[in-house]
Each structure stands twice: as structure tokens, then as C-alpha cells.
Amino acid sequence: MARGPRIVAELGRPETPEETADRKAESSRVYRSSQNVRNLIAALLATLAVVVVIMFAVPRGTPPEREPIDVAAVAEEISSAEGRTVIAPDMSDAWTVNRAGVEGNGAVRAFTVVYAPADEDQRGFLRVAQGFDADTSWPARVLSGSAPQDTVTIDGITWDRYELDPERTGNLTVAIATDAGTDTVLIYGAAGEKALEETARSVTDQINALREETE
């Protein structure tokens, strides 16, 4: 049996063919619109899933650890190139070497080793510099014009201890210097007295050897 025209409740009469066509067209539009929203949400979720996989599932490379610096080997190379004895501090495992090489400071070139605490929670640093044929005023120039305050004897060697002005020397807190034959050894940085003495003791024998070479 054929179905009669659809009765529209709010009109109280069957809908006209035009109203039927309009109703079906609107239903199709609403359906297509809902499908588009669902597709958009699904695409966003898929994209988010890919990002999560990239972030957490794909292994990411880590930069290789820097090769440790062999101070003795560097000193030996410079000694051969310069034709002179170059000191090589023998520090404990509490220190790590950040840099070692020849640096220029005006007319004086110096073999300089920069140490930092191996414990990353500790702050500070120390530099051991051997000024080649350095004149007596070289330490003062490195230390921004600081002058010796007094002397201190460490492991039988007398060192000049410098008075540092923070306004001129910045983060430097300690500095000592002594002659080593025709050269001058300067130890300076930001550290405590115990660390300073340890560093000075690490070059005692080499300073004595340099002094003996010029006798």
C-alpha cells in the first residue's frame, strides 16, 4: 500500500512536495556537516598520536661526551714546539680540565690550564699559568693591576699573594705567583685556600726543576 503524504504536526496538514524536498535537503546538509566535524576531530587525534610517538617512541641522539684533556700530553707537545720545559699540574680527581693551551697576554705568552670542580654542584675555578720569560709585572697585568699583599710559603716555595679588588678583577678571589727560572707561575681564580694550596703543591717539583735549569 502506498504511503500517504507526511502529516506535519505543527501545520495540521500533509506537507507539500516542496516542503518534503526542503526537509530532505536540510537533513542531508546537517548529516554532511556532522560528518565533516567527525572527520576533523579524527584527523586531529591522528596527528596528535603521531606527535606523541615521535616525542616518546623515537630514540633521540645525545651529544657525545667531550674527550678528557691530558694536561701532561699537551704540555709535552708545547714543550717540544717551544724548546723549553713546560709544567703540567698533577691535580686530584676532584678537578676536571676545561682547557689547556698557550694564551697570549700582551708581550707574554703563557701555557695556561683551566680547572673546574668535578662535582657539578660546586662552583669556582682555578687557572695555572706559566708565563714564558715573563717580567715581574706580568702577574699584575693579568690581575688588572693588583699588587702583592704578602707572601705565603707552600711546600717550601715562597709565593707572592695578591690583593684583589673585586671591582677590577671580577670573580677572582685568590691569586699567587712565584718565579720558575726565567718564567713566572701564576695561580689564580675563584676557590678556597685549601684548593689553592693543593694546586700550588701540584707544581712544586716542576718549579724547583725550572729554577735548577737556570742556576
Image (cartoon, helix red, strand yellow):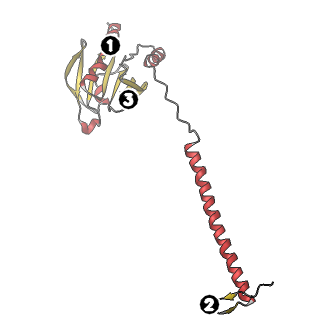
Q: Amino acid at mark 3?
A: Asn
Of badges 3 and 2, the one in the foreground is: 2
Residue 167 is situated, as x and y percent measured from the top left of the image, at 25, 39
Q: Secondary structure at mark 1?
A: helix
At label 1, counting other C-alpha atoms closer than 10 Å, the crowd grade (few under 14, some 14-19, many 20 or more) is many
Cα separation between marks 3 and 2 = 98 Å
The quarter of the rendered structure image containing the C terminus is top left
Q: Quadrant of residue 143?
A: top left
Query: Mark 3 or mark 2: which comes first in sequence?
Result: 2
The one nearer the camera, 41 or 186, is: 41
Q: Report the Cα–Cα distance between label 3 and label 1.
A: 21 Å
Q: Is residue 62 left or right of residue 203?
A: right
Label 3 sits on a secondary structure element that is strand
Q: Amino acid at mark 2?
A: Glu
Q: Give the percent coordinates (x, y) of residue 4.
A: 76, 87
Where does label 2 land, which residue?
10
Query: What residue is shown with label 3?
Result: 105
* Residue 21 versus residue 177 in the image, above or below: below
Observer able to see residue 109: no
**Residue 158, can we see it?**
yes
Compared to residue 134, the image places residue 171 above or below, namely: below
* Amino acid type for the residue under numbered disc 1: Ile
- Disc 1 + disc 2, Cβ < 8 Å: no
Q: Nearer the viewer, residue 41 or 97?
A: 41
Residue shown at 23% from the left, 35% from the top: 165
The residue drawn where x is 23% and y is 32% is: 164
What label sits on residue 167 in the rendered view? none
Kindly report which numbered mark, 3 or 1, lies closer to the viewer in this rendering.
1
Give residue 115's position: percent from left, percent from top: 37, 26
Residue 207 - label: 1
Please identify, in this view, whether the residue under mark 1 or under mark 2 is nearer the observer: 2
